[in-house]
Image (cartoon, rainbow, N blue to C red):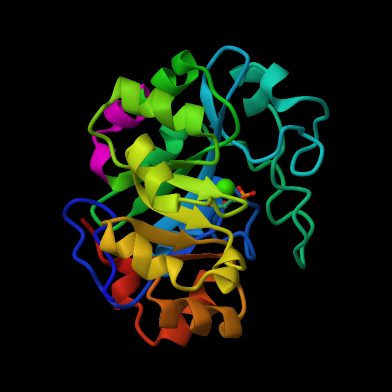
């Protein structure tokens, strides 16, 4: 069964959308501008990214709740001010042939990322972990101010966060990320107003018929995070709408068409 439009103007297509996970995170440090730029430059029109609020409620791109793995800092990310986050080195940890290749790469602001969008660049924005309504409001404000609002599709694991998004912008399409399948995925999406149900890709092995079930209700499926051709074949056969991957270039080559990766709303 064909997929459903991820965004209102995006036509259904039988080829899954390729979405770079945290940018081109196999070739540049995750959730940094070089990673996002590398993904877009490769012809992959979509990148996934994680956003969280600083202690002074400035949205920054960051995955973990602690600074240690991906920066030269330590401690809880959310206890840092924006100024403190901007002073960190988010690139030196990244293993490359030259250890200084990404030395000094900063943590980007959400404002930096949405400012880099254009007619061929879209953002799957994961609002990471729990957020207050005020924190969601700040993020939506940054997106709106960029002028590229229509190029940003929001997803979250946290239903309350999605409810905040929908309360601020009632018409905004959102996606629900899931670590474990719900008994009634269509019902959960309907209740939340979610137009996408985004499972860890292995979950679809338990319930492959779920993709068609969701499609019949007009709900898209974006599977994460699949990096192996066996999984891509399984997901493509199911008809998922998008595959989130750490190796977008390889997936584009495997699909045999980069044109579909840069399709745009
Ligand atoms: O967008 C899906 C995927 O990014 C969720 O997992 O832990 O990589 O944020 P994680
Ligand atoms: Ca993510």
Image quadrant occupied by the N terminus:
bottom left
Q: Nearer the viewer, residue 48 or 116?
A: 48
The answer to whether residue 17 of the structure is visible from this angle is: no
Image quadrant occupied by the C terminus:
bottom left
Residue 76 screen position, x and y as percent: 76, 25
Q: How many marks?
A: 0
Residue located 77% across and 63% down the image: 98
Q: Is residue 87 left or right of residue 146?
A: right
Residue 147 on the magenta segment:
yes
Above or below, 81 relative to 76: above
Q: Nearer the viewer, residue 179 or 105?
A: 179
Q: Nearer the viewer, residue 245 or 108?
A: 245
Residue located 40% across and 67% down the image: 211
Question: Which residues lie in the magenta part?
Answer: 141-150
Residue 166 screen position, x and y as percent: 33, 28
Residue located 41% across and 23% down the image: 164
Q: Nearer the viewer, residue 206 or 224?
A: 206
Outermost residue, front direction? Answer: 183
Residue located 26% across and 27% down the image: 170
Above or below, 92 relative to 248: above
Residue 107 screen position, x and y as percent: 61, 36
Above or below, 17 relative to 6: below
Residue 56 screen position, x and y as percent: 57, 12
Dominant secondary-structure state across the stretch colored magenta = helix
The answer to whether residue 8 of the structure is visible from this angle is: yes
Residue 195 on the magenta segment:
no
């Amino acid at each position: 069964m064909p997929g459903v439009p991820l965004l209102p103007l995006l036509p259904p297509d039988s080829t899954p959308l390729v979405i770079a996970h945290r940018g081109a995170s196999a070739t540049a440090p995750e959730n940094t501008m070089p990673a996002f730029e590398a993904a877009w430059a490769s012809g992959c029109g979509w990148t996934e990214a994680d956003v969280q609020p600083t202690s002074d409620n400035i949205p920054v791109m960051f995955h973990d709740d602690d600074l240690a793995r991906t920066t030269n800092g330590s401690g809880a990310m959310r206890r840092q001010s924006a100024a403190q986050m901007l002073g960190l080195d988010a690139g030196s940890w990244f293993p490359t042939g030259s250890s200084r290749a990404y030395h000094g790469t900063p943590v980007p602001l959400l404002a930096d990322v949405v400012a880099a969008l254009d007619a061929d660049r879209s953002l799957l924005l994961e609002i990471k972990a729990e957020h207050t309504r005020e924190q969601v409001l700040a993020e939506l404000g940054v997106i709106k101010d960029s002028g590229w609002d229509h190029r940003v599709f929001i997803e979250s694991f946290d239903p309350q966060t999605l409810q905040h998004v929908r309360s601020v912008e009632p018409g905004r399409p959102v996606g629900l990320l899931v670590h474990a399948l719900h008994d009634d995925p269509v019902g959960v999406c309907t209740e939340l107003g979610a137009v996408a149900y985004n499972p860890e890709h292995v979950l679809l092995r338990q319930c492959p018929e779920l993709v068609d079930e969701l499609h019949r209700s007009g709900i898209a499926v974006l599977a994460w995070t699949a990096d192996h051709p066996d999984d891509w074949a399984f997901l493509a056969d199911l008809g998922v709408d998008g595959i989130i991957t750490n190796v977008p270039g390889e997936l584009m080559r495997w699909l045999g068409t980069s044109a579909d990766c840069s399709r745009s709303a």
